[in-house]
Image: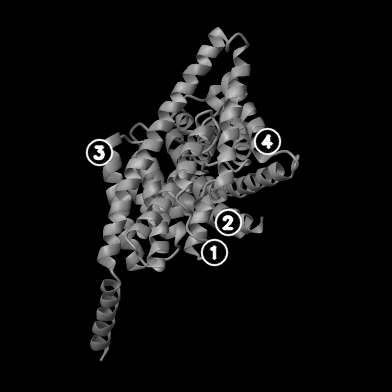
Amino acid sequence: MSDSTSTHTTQSESSEILGLNIWRLVAVAAVAGIGVGFIGGTFHWMLVHGSERFSALLEHWKADGFYGVPGWIGAALIAGICIGLARWLVYFAPSAAGSGVQHVEAVMRKEADPAPLRVLPIKFFGGLLAMVPGMALGREGPTIQMAAVIGSQCGRIFRLSKEDGFLLYTAVAGAGLSVAFNAPMAGIAFVLEEVTRKITTRSVLITLIAVATSITVFRALFGNAISFSIPALVAPELANLILYAILGLIVGLMGALYNRNILFGLNLFSTTMPNIPVALKAAFVGAGVGLIAYWQPSWVGGGELQVQQVLSNNFGAQALITLLIVRWLLGSISYSPSLPGGLFAPLLLVGAISGALFAQLINFIPALAFQADTVSFALVGMAAFFTAVVRAPFTGVLLIIEMSGGVILTPGLLVACVCATLITSYMGSPPIYDSLRERMFSR
């Protein structure tokens, strides 16, 4: 009886999967993934090279001035114009504001319709305008939402049902994250853990194929370089795991505060000088960031370059503390105008700094019989802070492993992420995208 029931159930599940055009859905997801690999990779390439070009211009303006005026005026003017334009573009598609991940999640929950096609160019060019001058924003937000739009449009072109269109919109978003950081497993985990928050055979299959095709195209066109270069690491011992757990608790507390910091910045921006056009206020913010980029270029940008410097042990304790304070404030300031830009990359830098500082503090205590490896603690701090803010521990672990190649740190990453999740849950701090989604509908 039991075997018969089990066989009947398995056959029913198989019939359900195969009977709803799963082959067609998988084929459309594969096509969408190819588009994501090309467009997301192009966006990444243009952002990297555009940022390098802007940095070179800043150095030129320092030496020769800006058309007869001091170089800092040019830096403020150009950055202000670019960021004002980026915010102006959002007028034409309000769903393109901010990271975009919160809108993708709202679509999955049937709280919103898929973003229209015009969001794709707005995210692409608006993201470049916002991030090239140095705003502390991440490329993953625009890439994820662009990927979702590509998935939705492919579903429309191939005349999928509305239900499958919604599913494709959210599942293909994982291809966007995989392309943004060259991290396919993290992209898959992000869809299942954060966006859909449930696992079905259909969602898994289309996510897998979309990520597979997108990352294949991306690597074929733009290379397969790992994000961060790190020295050889040592497997963590029990004492290290205890310290990683403590770091996870500390970073978890910081993550809860960081979420409030982001929301405070958004509310402050929207309530300050409400009669001034939003794009003009964004331009003022951009001009300020342009000045910072001119005088202290190591403080601005998405954060990947600074993370590499942390992992290369190029910062002492004082420099790390200064950078932590600056990036804590700059992250909120940069996100406050709701520009087309994400949160992942900037918060990874905050986590790296926190982990490195914790290791330096441990090494300062003479009673301890071992030295804490700064690189290992920086990587663990990145995963734990990501988990505390986003509340996606599995994604955080996979993301850091794929970006650094530090597979040997897996036990430490797991322990810290569990502790970060526990402390933020105990504090009642909601995940940042839940808060942003609620805020999106309350306005």
Q: CA distance from mark 3 to mark 4?
A: 41 Å
Q: Report helix, strand or loop for mark 2.
A: helix
Q: Amino acid at mark 3?
A: Ala
Q: Nearer the viewer, mark 2 or mark 4?
A: 4
- Could you tell me if the residues under marks 1 and 2 are in contact, i.e. CB atoms within 8 Å? yes
Q: Position of residue 247 (x, y in %)?
A: 53, 45
Report the residue at 51% width, 14% height from top.
Answer: 59
Q: CA distance from mark 2 to mark 4?
A: 23 Å
Question: Disc 2 marks which residue?
Answer: 437
Q: Amino acid at mark 4?
A: Lys
Quadrant location, the C terminus:
bottom right
Q: Residues within 10 Å of mark 1 (few under 14, many from 20)?
A: few
Q: CA distance from mark 4 to mark 1?
A: 30 Å
In the displayed structure, 394 sits above or below 221; it is below
Colour pattern: one colour
Q: CA distance from mark 1 to mark 2?
A: 10 Å
Marks 2 and 3, the one that precedes in the sequence: 3
- Could you tell me if the residues under marks 2 and 3 are in contact, i.e. CB atoms within 8 Å? no
Question: Disc 3 marks which residue?
Answer: 220
Question: Disc 4 marks which residue?
Answer: 281
Mark drawn on residue 111: 1
Q: CA distance from mark 1 to mark 3?
A: 37 Å
Q: Residues within 10 Å of mark 3 (few under 14, many from 20)?
A: few
Q: Nearer the viewer, mark 3 or mark 4?
A: 4
- In the picture, residue 67 is in which quadrant? top right
